[in-house]
Amino acid sequence: MTRSANRQPDELRPVEIIVNPGKYAEGSCFIKCGDTHVMCTATVEEKIPTWLKNSGQGWITAEYGMLPRATGVRTEREAKKGQSGRTHEIQRLIGRALRAGADLRALDGFCIKIDCDVLQADGGTRTASITGGFVALYMACQQLLKSGKIKKFPIKRMVAAVSCGIIQGIPMLDLDYMEDSNAGTDSNFVMTDRNDLIEIQGTAEHGTFTPQELNELLNLAQKGIRELIEKQRTVLNIKK
């Protein structure tokens, strides 16, 4: 099977991360993974959810949405028809992923909200949102520390995510929409810069897949996430 841009099975789509595209947000980036484009912004609020009162920790949460013409056919705005189950599930995933890389006690009294808005979708919007969302989160935490509002930098581990799938028996990294639509098995992996797993989402669309195939997908994901984290390090000027 010929992939977009003649990619090899273990090759990411072209990735570009542009920092500070937003004037007002405490942290922002525009991430492009092939033809999937997502704007990620971080907003710092000096308040925490009521259920965290007196807990000694802060919070990180996320919201996700797609513009009506992010895809080939216009979709109604969710503000008009109500939030879908898919949207709810994705934004919960983004929040879980980003919290896994942070020390919430270092954010005591603060809530950071990550908004991920999909401008154009060609597969992997949730994974791009996590990878870009981490960059926006990191920048917001830098501002909090620099301002003296927090005393300890809250980011413990870097976080990124990527999709993998099996198409015509071949494990492939970073699926675009057409590949995802034709995959017999598709999955999403969220990991840290230590190769620790945060979440795996895997589904056999047709039939089943074996533990060996899962390991092959994991190996691809580890390679892709290492490359994504290097790109995060570059734009954030983080040295190993």
Image (cartoon, rainbow, N blue to C red):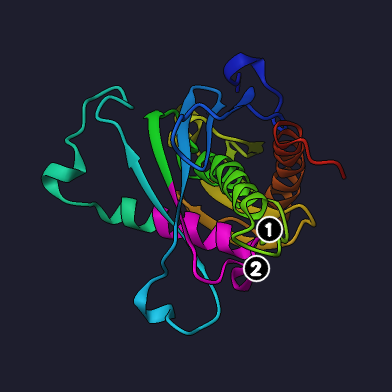
Q: Are marks 2 and 1 in contact (CB under 8 Å)?
A: yes
Q: Position of residue 198 (x, y in %)?
A: 63, 62
In the rendered image, residue 102 lying in the magenta stretch gets the answer yes
Residue at 77 percent of width and 35 percent of height? 237
Residue 206 is left or right of residue 79, and the answer is right
Q: Where is mark 1, residue-wise?
A: 155
Residue at 33 percent of width and 42 percent of height? 65
Q: Provide the secondary structure element on which disc 2 rests.
A: loop
Q: Position of residue 50 (x, y in %)?
A: 35, 77
**Tag 2: amino acid:** Asp
Residue that protrudes farthest toward the bottom in the picture? 54
Is 193 placed above or below 181 here? Answer: below
Residue 162 in sight in this render: no
Q: Which residues are magenta?
A: 90-114
In the rendered image, residue 199 lying in the magenta stretch gets the answer no
Q: Provide the secondary structure element on which disc 1 rests.
A: loop
Residue at 49 percent of width and 22 percent of height? 35
Q: Quadrant of residue 227?
A: top right
Residue 197 in sight in this render: yes
Residue at 57 percent of width and 47 percent of height? 140
How packed is label 2: few (under 14 Cα within 10 Å), some, or many (20 or more)?
some
**Tag 1: amino acid:** Ile
Q: Where is mark 2, residue-wise?
A: 103
Residue 101 is left or right of residue 193, and the answer is left
